Image: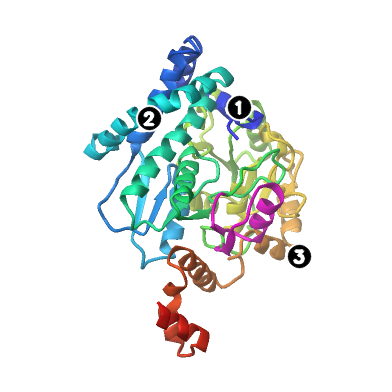
Amino acid sequence: METTSARAAVFEEIKSKNRLYRFVDAVYERSGESLFQPLFLLAYMFKCVLSIGPLTGSSAELVSIAQFPNEKKAVARAVDLLPQLCTDNLTLSMRHIFSLEQVSAAVALLGLVPRIWGFLRRLARSHSFMPSARIASALAFYIRFSQILDQKACLAAALIPSNYSPEAIGLAAAAHQHGRQVVYVNHAPVPLNAPYVPPVLADCALFYGEMTAEAYKTKARFQSDVALIGQPLAARPMTWRDTVQTVGIFLTAGTKLETLQSLVATIRLDLPDARVLIRQHPVTLLKMDFASLALQDENVELTLGNPLDDEIQACDLVICGNSGVALNVLGAGRPVAYLSSLDGLAFDYNGFVINRLVHSVPWWTNDIYDRLRSFYQMPGWPDVMQKYDAAYGADAKALKQRASKTLLQHIRGKAALLPQLEDRHAIDPSEQRLRVTN
């Protein structure tokens, strides 16, 4: 995953926008492959090991790891389904390095250097800094999580919100190696037309809707039990207004600055009194420099990190490129105009157009709102939306109950269902025998 052309494009964008990453990358490239580059990677592994926390002494049954806000929200949704379980919710921060337990973990990693040195040298010979560092960090996380699972026999399962981040891969691999269950909850849609989709290394998966499961089955190695939970935002019917007062442009990685600049100018000519709200990608490493837009307009606003639902509700329509945020916008009741040229990914990267979820436009036109209204008011569109968002027009409480039952089966086994069965006052003989056995 880390050595594909799509990831390379993301790495280049990060370097172009972050001075520190440019500096580290330049120093790394000027270092020797046999000694200094492997030392760089080893130092990065130590940084990863030291950043895991906070570790508690509780008798938690479930451990999770999340780094970005959307991942943390995905984890929180899964944990909310299991109020009876104690969970260790771990994050990555250098604030955790001052723990004595972290220092002990670093010493343990130091003892493994002879075993991993040859691997780091091969990475240095084969790849540039960013893919090498992320691959090495996956190994570091695997080592550290293996130590944690060895020390905490009470942990029955691991919860991951990503199938490609190094920390999630490391936790999933360590959990399976130590005989634990792995639960995956997706924090974004699957790019149906991506050249490569990483496998889901989990025993149970929580998805927004059945289209997510179908996409994984089509594009990746996937054999998990599935439970549907719907989108994180409250599902709302599509809302239409008499006039367009606010146009949202929600960005993703790989946004083309010149296209964005031209689009904003076109909108401002057609709707001189309207507000244009530009929402940046939530990963701060990918933030844009507003000054580079060369726009001095009080009606144009660039935001970063604001609550997604608030910004969706502030817009009358939203323009997106190849971004999964389109699904959030639609579920929250606002129409989406898909503009492929807004970023550098292939047309219909997420598969939303071919499945009739979003309306594709070649550019901004003065009749765009009317065309969106016609598309999203088609009789069959709500059915398409529900395939992507199981909570759309459905009983959200029933979804949560079914998902909770599936999770408990994997984390605690069938014995966990006995209290629920007793509440129904109708237990068949096979379930009665199960109670006696347990």
Q: Magenta span covers which residues?
A: 201-229
Label 1: state its secondary structure.
Answer: helix
Label 3: state its secondary structure.
Answer: loop
Which quadrant of the view contains residue 344? top right
User: Is 226 rendered above or below residue 305?
Assistant: below
The numbered dot on residue 112 is: 2
User: Is 398 rendered above or below residue 117?
Assistant: below
User: Is 432 rendered above or below residue 91?
Assistant: below
Depth check: give the residue in front, 125 or 44. Answer: 125
Q: Residues within 10 Å of mark 1 (few under 14, many from 20)?
A: some
Please tell me whether mark 3 or mark 2 is closer to you in this view: 2
**Residue at label 3?**
380
Residue 28 placement, left or right of 328: left
Q: Residue at x 48, y 64 (%)?
A: 410
Q: Residue at x 67, y 35 (%)?
A: 342
Please tell me whether mark 1 or mark 2 is closer to you in this view: 2
Depth check: give the residue in front, 357 or 131. Answer: 131
Are the residues tagged 3 and 2 within 8 Å (C-beta)? no
Q: Earlier in the sequence, mark 3 or mark 2?
A: 2
Is residue 349 in view? Answer: yes
Residue 33 placement, left or right of 105: right
Q: CA distance from mark 3 to mark 2?
A: 58 Å
Where residue 347 appears, as percent x and y from the top left, is: 74, 39
**Residue at label 1?**
8
| Quadrant including the N terminus | top right
Residue type highlighted by circle 2 = Leu
Residue type highlighted by circle 1 = Ala
Depth check: give the residue in front, 138 or 111. Answer: 111
Q: Is residue 223 magenta?
A: yes
Where residue 13 appears, as percent x and y from the top left, is: 56, 26
Is residue 20 in view? Answer: no
Q: Residues within 10 Å of mark 3 (few under 14, many from 20)?
A: few
